[in-house]
Image (cartoon, rainbow, N blue to C red):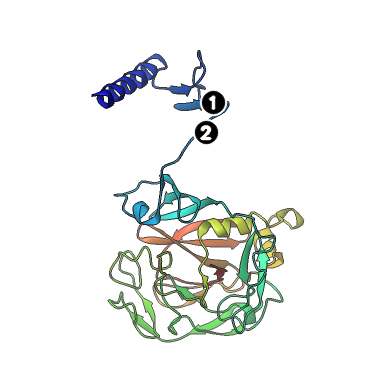
């Protein structure tokens, strides 16, 4: 009975506050406080904090139909997490910035070096690249072009002949019904222009464990937020506005080239030497998210999963 009375009392207080403040609420341990005019809810205290719901990963994953911007504290990872466009993302973790160099003690996979940038440990070149870039249009560092959510099964291999020209392997009209479709690049004009016909593969590269991880063991495709950390660290002021994204990408510690893309519709390679197009691990509705940069433009964007983009791996 006491519990019911307490709940009724709380509801009555919140209702009266919202009526008094015209649907704006202040919760305070001081008297006479009113919410800021820009806030629908304001919490005021000199000696208390705000507690997010705290749960482990299994309970988090049991949440039914989470909506964008839903936040929790993951007790297992000790991370504040937010749900955005189909997956959970880490906003902050208790060990964030604990290591001065996140690459310290990390052994690079065969054929790669490693580089620290913006608080993360990265491979020093794109998957499939022959060398670290000498320039933004150095075709020897372009590497492979992957369809989103596919393993390194051979479909990604490109033979580059110069900075603007490359040739991929054979194509196959799809979408296909197998996660192991062989080594052919799958072309499709069927919505949603995904190489796989299930239309439900949102978690291929952001699942736990990862499905079809193209990166070496212990490495993975970066999230959109990790790419954002990277490009926000670039110094655009050093370059002409019309060239800054491409040059800043090359001048960054990652030395990212403008390796172009392979088209979902016909398997043709476009924009080599002119545009950088890189996958993130994030999905967005029936599409996935990529990082684009060219001319005076750099932006994350949703794009068809059937496109072939470059992949730069980050340490788990």
Q: Secondary structure at mark 2?
A: loop
User: On residue 215, which mark appears?
Assistant: none
Mark 2 sits on what residue? 49
Residue 254 visible in the snapshot: no
Above or below residue 248? Residue 94 is above
Name the spot of residue 102 as percent of width and height, x first: 64, 64
Q: How far is disc 2 from disc 1 in space, using C-alphas? A: 7 Å
Q: Residue at x 40, y 65 (%)?
A: 207
For the residues labelled 2 and 1, say whether their Cβ atoms are less than 8 Å apart: yes
Q: Residues within 10 Å of mark 1 (few under 14, many from 20)?
A: few
Q: Residue at x 29, y 49 (%)?
A: 64
Name the spot of residue 61 as percent of width and height, x first: 35, 55
Residue 113 placement, left or right of 147: right
Mark 1 sits on what residue? 45
Name the spot of residue 247 as percent of width and height, x first: 69, 64
Above or below residue 37? Residue 227 is below
Q: Residues within 10 Å of mark 2 (few under 14, many from 20)?
A: few
Residue 35 visible in the snapshot: yes
- Which quadrant of the view contains residue 182? bottom left
Question: Who is closer to the viewer here, 52 or 143?
Answer: 52
Above or below residue 113? Residue 234 is above
Name the spot of residue 300 as percent of width and height, x first: 52, 57
Question: Who is closer to the viewer here, 283 or 60?
Answer: 60
Above or below residue 274? Residue 158 is below
Furthest toward the left, the residue is 1
Residue 203 placement, left or right of 35: left
- Which quadrant of the view contains residue 206? bottom left
């Amino acid at each position: 009975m006491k519990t019911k009375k307490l709940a009724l009392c709380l509801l009555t207080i919140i209702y009266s506050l919202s009526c008094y403040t015209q649907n704006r609420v202040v919760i305070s341990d001081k008297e006479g406080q009113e919410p800021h005019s820009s806030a629908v809810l304001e919490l005021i205290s000199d000696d208390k904090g705000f507690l997010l719901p705290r749960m482990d990963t299994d309970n988090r994953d049991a949440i039914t139909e989470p909506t964008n911007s839903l936040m929790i504290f993951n007790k297992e990872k000790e991370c504040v997490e937010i749900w955005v466009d189909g997956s959970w993302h880490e906003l902050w973790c208790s060990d964030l910035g604990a290591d001065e160099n996140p690459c310290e003690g990390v052994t690079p996979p065969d054929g790669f070096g490693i580089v620290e940038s913006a608080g993360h440990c990265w491979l020093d070149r794109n998957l499939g690249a022959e060398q670290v870039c000498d320039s933004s249009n150095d075709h020897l560092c372009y590497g492979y072009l992957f369809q989103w959510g596919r393993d390194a099964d051979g479909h990604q291999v490109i033979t580059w002949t110069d900075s603007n020209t490359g040739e991929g392997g054979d194509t196959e009209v799809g979408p296909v019904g197998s996660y192991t479709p062989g080594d052919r690049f799958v072309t499709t004009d069927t919505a949603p222009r995904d190489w796989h016909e299930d239309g439900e593969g949102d978690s291929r590269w952001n699942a736990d464990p990862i499905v079809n991880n193209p990166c070496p063991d212990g490495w993975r495709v970066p999230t959109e937020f990790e790419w954002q950390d990277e490009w926000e660290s670039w110094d655009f002021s050093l370059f002409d506005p019309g060239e800054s994204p491409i040059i800043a990408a090359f001048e960054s510690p990652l030395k990212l080239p403008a390796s172009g893309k392979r088209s979902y519709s016909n398997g043709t390679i476009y924009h080599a030497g002119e545009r950088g197009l890189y996958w993130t691990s994030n999905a967005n509705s029936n599409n996935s998210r990529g990082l684009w940069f060219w001319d005076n433009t750099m932006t994350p964007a949703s794009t068809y999963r059937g496109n072939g983009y470059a992949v730069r791996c980050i340490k788990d």
